[in-house]
Image (cartoon, rainbow, N blue to C red):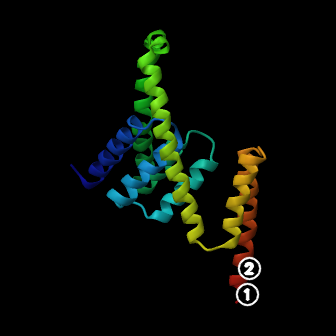
Amino acid sequence: MSTKAKKLWILFKSMFVLSACTFGGGFVIVSLMKKKFVEELKWLEEDEMLDVTAITQSAPGPLPVNASVIIGYRMAGIVGSLTAVLGTILPPMIIISVISLFYDQFRTNKYIAVALQVMRAGVAAVIFDVVINLAKNVCKTRRILYIVMMITAFISTYLLGVSAMIVILVSLGIGLIDLAVQTRKGSLK
């Protein structure tokens, strides 16, 4: 097996397993992707994973699929993106297809209802872990602007009920203005 084929197989298998074992939505898989691709395989740096997370949250579509497109492309171009997306979408398609066949039995089964309730607690803990790690990374930049934006975004969405999309677009605008200012300062020196 060639090096590229081996890398594609590892990419597919990793995304398949992560997707198959992830319950609770996109934020849960971010933590698992970080462990797999940053810590275990060392394919990405911590900062790159943070960038992938920011981009995938801002783009339309499911977070795991968006992340797999970027990570796959980073590892092996277009073929890598397609391989990663396939590995990401197959498990939910298979699981949902099976569940849909037995929907009535799942809906009325008290054991499955309890299992799903317990899984929510675990999912909440993983999402909390992701939030704490992302906040730490923002604080590590030591940029007052970023820290204030993070706190303002939290207050806006959680306490004031501002749409996440508005917060993302405003943050994008502020980020572009900051980039222009930083570029101008750099070019004046």
Q: Is residue 72 visible?
A: no
Please tell me how crowded label 1 is: few (under 14), some (14-19), or many (20+) other residues with Cα within 10 Å. few
> Which residue appears at 76% of the width and 56% of the height?
170
Say what secondary structure mark 1 lies in.
Answer: helix
**Residue 178 location in percent, x, y?**
73, 70
Read off the residue under disc 1.
Answer: 188
Instruction: Tell me the residue at 70%/84% (across/down).
Output: 187
Is 31 above or below relative to 19? below
> From the viewer's perspective, is residue 167 above or below residue 111?
below
57 and 74: which one is in front?
57
Secondary structure under the numbered disc 2 in the rendered image: helix
Total numbered badges shown on the rendered structure: 2
Looking at the picture, which amino acid does disc 2 mark? Arg
Tell me the residue that label 2 is attached to: 184
- Residues at circles 2 and 1 in contact by the CB criterion of under 8 Å: yes
Q: Residue at x 45, y 46 (%)?
A: 81
Q: Residue at x 48, y 49 (%)?
A: 30
Residue 163 is situated, as x and y percent measured from the top left of the image, at 75, 44
- For this orientation, the residue located farthest to the left is 1
Residue closer to the observer: 132 or 54: 132
Q: Is residue 90 left or right of residue 129?
A: left
- Which residue lies most toward the bottom here? 189
- Could you tell me how far apart the alpha carbons at marks 2 and 1 are, in whole angstroms? 6 Å
Q: Amino acid at mark 1?
A: Leu
